[in-house]
Image (tube, coloured by chain):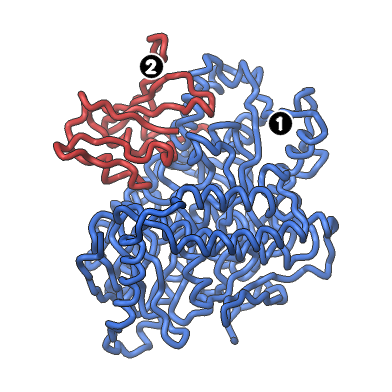
Amino acid sequence: MSIIINPEKCKGCGLCTDVCPGSLIAQKDHGTAYIKYPKDCWGCASCIKECHFGAIALYLGADIGGMGSQMTVSATEDTLTWNIQKRDGTKDQIIINKKESNKY
Amino acid sequence: MQIEKRQILHTDILIIGGGTAGCYAALTIREHSDYSIIIAEKANIKRSGCLAAGVNAINAYIVKGNKPEDYVNYAKKDADGIVREDLLMTMSEGLNRVTDKMEKLGLVILKDENGEYVARGNRNIKINGENMKPLLADAVSKLPDVTVLNRINITDYIVEDNVIRGAYGFSIEDACAYEIRARKVLCATGGAAGLYRPNNPGFSRHKMWYPPFNTGAGYAMGIKSGAEMTTFEMRFIALRCKDTIAPTGTIAQGVGAKQVNAKGEVYENKYGLTTSERVYGTVMENLQGRGPCYLRTEGISKEQDESLRKAYLNMAPSQTLKWVEAGRNPSQQNVEIEGTEPYIVGGHTASGYWVDTNRQTTIHGLYAAGDVAGGCPQKYVTGAMVEGEIAALDMIRHLKKEADEPQKEEKEAFDKKIAEYDHFLSNQSGMFTTEALEEAMQKVMDNYAGGISTHYQFNEKQLELAKEKITQLTALVDELHAEDMHELMFIYELKERLTVCLSVIAHLGARKETRWHSFAENLDYPEKSDAWMKYVNSRYTDGKLQIIYRDLVGREEHYEHHN
């Protein structure tokens, strides 16, 4: 389980570094964030929700069935939109209304 | 590298761990008093603790038509009697109160047309719990005279004549050591993960049920300070979706999916329906050649697929990613399940500090709430909040009665603690790394103390070996080197886990029966016996872990410590 941070999209704001419940994300001298301890990621997606620039993606390690898909989130006040890009280029999108309870 | 700075801080109340219980305690203290608070948090309170990804439901709630007594009965039955009914009762009475408070803080709870919460079963209500922790943390950050110290790793209590005086720790970001002096301390550090070799021991080693960052700090500090602990032998093993280790309850309860084996036979009724029996049944089906096991989701509707995909994004997003990645929704493919490695966690089973009814530990002025507090299983999120509340109110009650004596600092003791930190920072890199010793510890626990590879079973000979090998590993810790403050935290996390491992081994050996399949399956004593309707407690004194057996505490009792 881990995340990847796209250095092209990262603006160095440090929000992901602050929020990580494992303190696993560090910043290089010029501010760009990177995951310092990739094997220690719990997969909670806190950093992904925090990032305003869609720079962080969640993926499944190959040891738990990962096949290269990446998941990012864009948040508005009322919604969380989860974008999943598969390795073959196809996309899936799931929009969650924050004001709506789980059905189960 | 060496410790370069030292900070000495004073407060009325120190809360160690800004998770669910700790944050809720802070809210309660400030609502009922003006006492100053320091929250020392290892990460950042916004998403730290069990609620990082969110939670799918409130699993401890007294739904309409039920009484708190019903919840106590349920938890008691699930733990086969080894619970503190006084703790369960006081917790159950507060569940709905803290839920109301969470709704006021902004938690979305599903309601019916009459404005009543919609129940999921007898004890659960439906919510959108994705943002539960940020809501709590936000409320805490608005409180006056509450100092949140993020990224501070607390390593030791300061205890004088069995009275708590504060704690020592260090920043994981800069070379600063902390001495925090307090009149009362609440330990809310959570339980312990990472003791046993996990389901996914390689790259995804932290894809586990419990927060991998909860490393048993609170238990270890208590053990080292001579606090009495209870029921460490009642380990918790979660039944989870394979690989992603995502929850199964949402599927089981949400769409009514049964546990089936590879032949498609429903096996759950064969073994019983308590939490441990559901795990045990799955283990047995696999052992008898009828694995893998699944939750039978094939044939559910498209709408149910969609609801499940959304529900998992709100608590365990990797499971939804897995379904999308596979190109098959649960309606098209049953969900494979497996048991996790064992954890020590007082919010699900009953391991933790031995506390009085007000959640004070056997160290005066030190309280425990949430997963670190024992005797009160099935507390979940709301129960942890109630415990934070109960502890907070009792701390206030005592503080009002007690004189505010000046807090004395002990320079010599702080110097000694800093020298201990410096030892690891200045050690030469040696043969062993922290990671290697952690792996070795997990292997020992797995092989000899009832891990996944031995189907959670053990015997006395194996426990002896486990003790011997964990003791050997503990001796190697002194040689470890920390390159920076973060690595220093890794060393202390390992030390905590090793301390907890020794207690787990001692407790597993001390209960000479098998009361809970899988959770504590002692092959030398495969039956359960009424003679064991008692608590197994322990206390570290004179360099040895002593086992103490105690009689069960009744529901109406107000339990106080007498020794």
Q: Does residue B534 appear to the left or right of A67 in the view shown? A: right
Residue B258, disc: 1
Q: Chain of mark 2?
A: A
**Contact between labelled residues 2 and 1, with CB atoms less than 8 Å apart:** no
* Name of the residue lying farthest toward the left: A30
| Residue type, label 2 | Gln
Residue B403 rendering spot, x and y as whole percentages: 32, 90
Query: What residue is at 54 percent from the left and 43 percent from the top?
Result: B209
Query: What residue is at 29 percent from the left and 29 percent from the top?
Result: A5
Mark 1 to mark 2: distance in Å? 32 Å
Quarter placement of the C terminus of chain A: top right
User: Considering only vertical position in the picture, is B553 above or below B77?
Assistant: below
Camera-side residue of B483 and B518: B483
Residue B366, disc: none
Q: Does residue B472 appear to the left or right of A90 in the view shown? A: right
Residue B47 rendering spot, x and y as whole percentages: 36, 47
Q: Which residue is mark 2?
A: A85
Write down which chain is painted red: A
Quarter placement of the N terminus of chain A: top left
Q: Chain of mark 1?
A: B
Are both tags, 1 and 2, on one chain? Answer: no
| Residue type, label 1 | Lys
Q: Quadrant of residue B146?
A: bottom left
Residue B33 rendering spot, x and y as whole percentages: 31, 74
Colour assigned to chain B in the rendering is blue
User: Considering only vertical position in the picture, is B138 above or below A99?
Assistant: below
Mark 1 surroundings: few (<14), some (14-19) or many (≥20) residues within 10 A: some
Camera-side residue of B248 and B113: B248
